[in-house]
Amino acid sequence: MAGFDAPYVPGWDCHGLPIEHKVETTHGKHLAPEHARELCREYAGAQVETQLADFVRLGIIGDWDHPYRTMNFANEAGEMRALAEMVDAGYVFKGLKPVNWCFDCGSALAEAEVEYADKKSDAIDVAFPVEEADKLAAAFGLTELAKPAAVVIWTTTPWTIPANQALNVHPEFTYALVDTGERLLLLAEELVESCLERFDLQGEVIATTQGKNLDLINFRHPFYDRLSPVYLAEYVESEVGSTGIVHSAPSYGMDDFITCREHGMEFDDMLNPVQGNGVYVDDLPFFGGQMIWKANPHIVEKLREVGALMAHIPIKHSYMHCWRHKTPVIYRATAQWFVGMDIKGKDGRTLRERALEGIEATAFTPAWGQARLHSMIANRPDWCISRQRNWGVPIPFFLHKQTGELHPRTVGLMEEAAKRVEQEGIDAWFKLDPAELLGAEAADYDKVTDTLDVWFDSGTTHRHVLRGSHPMATKMARGRISTWKALISTAAGFIRRC
């Protein structure tokens, strides 16, 4: 109305877990994948029509005759082509990292799909007996230890103890060796008094040392026959209620994962006994086959049985929950596909660098928006783009069965897959016989069935509307649209719908 040509093209992101969850709630969880996708498409289509009619009734002026829907076949193919460009640039990789995992969804979650709510947990202090007493004595400037010794950790996740593989101390903290009568306890010096009170013990500090002197000293797991070495880590805190020492289960915490990797731990060596449904693998000693939340009290009792439980205090604290199921989620290391923010692409720049350059080259109104977005991109971690679900745009990859590597012609194969999806929708990929694209090589490759994070839908809509097959893209290609023609056309469509 101010004379500017700013046509509004409404649209809907149509894939993702919310829709699939609604279908599962209505029709049950154990649907055949192709039937689940059919029901999801029907449900999304019905919601779009209802919402579109409501927007028109509200008097919102837009190109309601030509909205975009990410589930349109051409748009689904466009998403796959966008992914292919990122693969071609070298930004996509497969890695094992802890990601937000919901047992009810059976999938990884994006950060935006996690909310925080109060949860009751078992806060426990656990003693790990020393394995290398001579090295521990030397670290404290002693010739020997006069009695048994143990390091004490504090955690609110007893279920992670079976996966413990290391202990973390801060290199610059001062740690104390405390004589409590029966044994020596290793604690952060500033927390000794509060810890002894929590343990209901009396004690005397006999020696102190800096955390850096404890590096690589081995302790023993409380109830499994394996070692837990000390790794230095600056993320360790000395807040009241803790001990100043952190137990590390690399499959279930990002900081744990990073420090263990930095100390040479290979992916295959990381213990990951929790399955996607939240149940321990059957062969886990003592707790196999148990759901982790139900196993918590059993783990606490096992620690008490072996004399490793120093304190047990139930607490209520803020904890991660799935935004749709309202149930607790965990960090869980799984093999996922990531967009790497700091991988150098073909042009020698990282994706983070390219994004920040784009932000700097853009004029923002209001101006503070630039700094805000710059900060978000500058600190953003790698993006986990894969989901283990049915209703989503497929990640059309073939992985070699022996090496796990992508097919050398991946980008070209993705285009072939996109052509099929453009004609038949995402089902074209899921029902595809690999031999159709790979020929005799098909026997050597597995077809990936993961789907893209739904944020990839919204992140690629500019391709559909401005560069793809949408009528707006055609209009833009022909030059600026007449403002009056656009207004008249929009008004006519609005009147027809009313």
Image (spheres, rainbow, N blue to C red):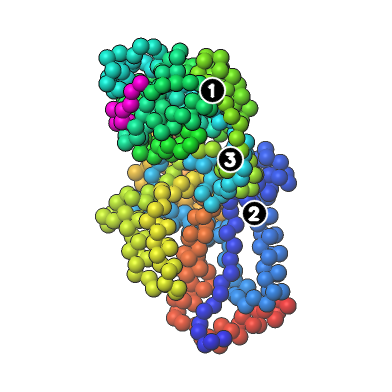
Give the CA distance from mark 2 to mark 3: 39 Å
Q: SS at mark 3?
A: strand
Q: Nearer the viewer, mark 2 or mark 1?
A: 1
Taking the spot 60% from the left edge, 57% from the top edge, the residue there is 14
**Which residue is tagged 1?**
200
Taking the spot 37% from the left edge, 56% from the top edge, the residue there is 378
**Which residue is tagged 3?**
317
* Boundaries of the magenta span: 206-213
Q: Amino acid at mark 1?
A: Asp
Q: Nearer the viewer, mark 1 or mark 3?
A: 1
Q: Is tag 2's residue or tag 1's residue first in the polypeptide sequence? A: 2
The front one of 271 and 439 is 271
Q: Position of residue 216 (x, y in %)?
A: 31, 25
Give the CA distance from mark 1 to mark 3: 23 Å
Say whether residue 289 is visible: no
The C terminus - image quarter? bottom right
**Which residue is tagged 2?**
41
Disc 1 and disc 3 in contact, CB within 8 angstroms? no
The front one of 107 and 117 is 117
When asked about the image quadrant of residue 486, the answer is bottom right
Taking the spot 38% from the left edge, 37% from the top edge, the residue there is 258
User: Viewed as shown, does residue 198 lie left or right of 25?
Assistant: left
Q: Amino acid at mark 2?
A: Arg
Residue 208 drawn in magenta: yes
Say whether residue 25 is visible: yes
Q: Residues within 10 Å of mark 1 (few under 14, many from 20)?
A: few
Q: Amino acid at mark 3?
A: His
Residue 464 drawn in magenta: no
Taking the spot 32% from the left edge, 49% from the top edge, the residue there is 343
Q: Position of residue 4 (x, y in %)?
A: 50, 84
Q: SS at mark 1?
A: loop
The front one of 418 and 216 is 216
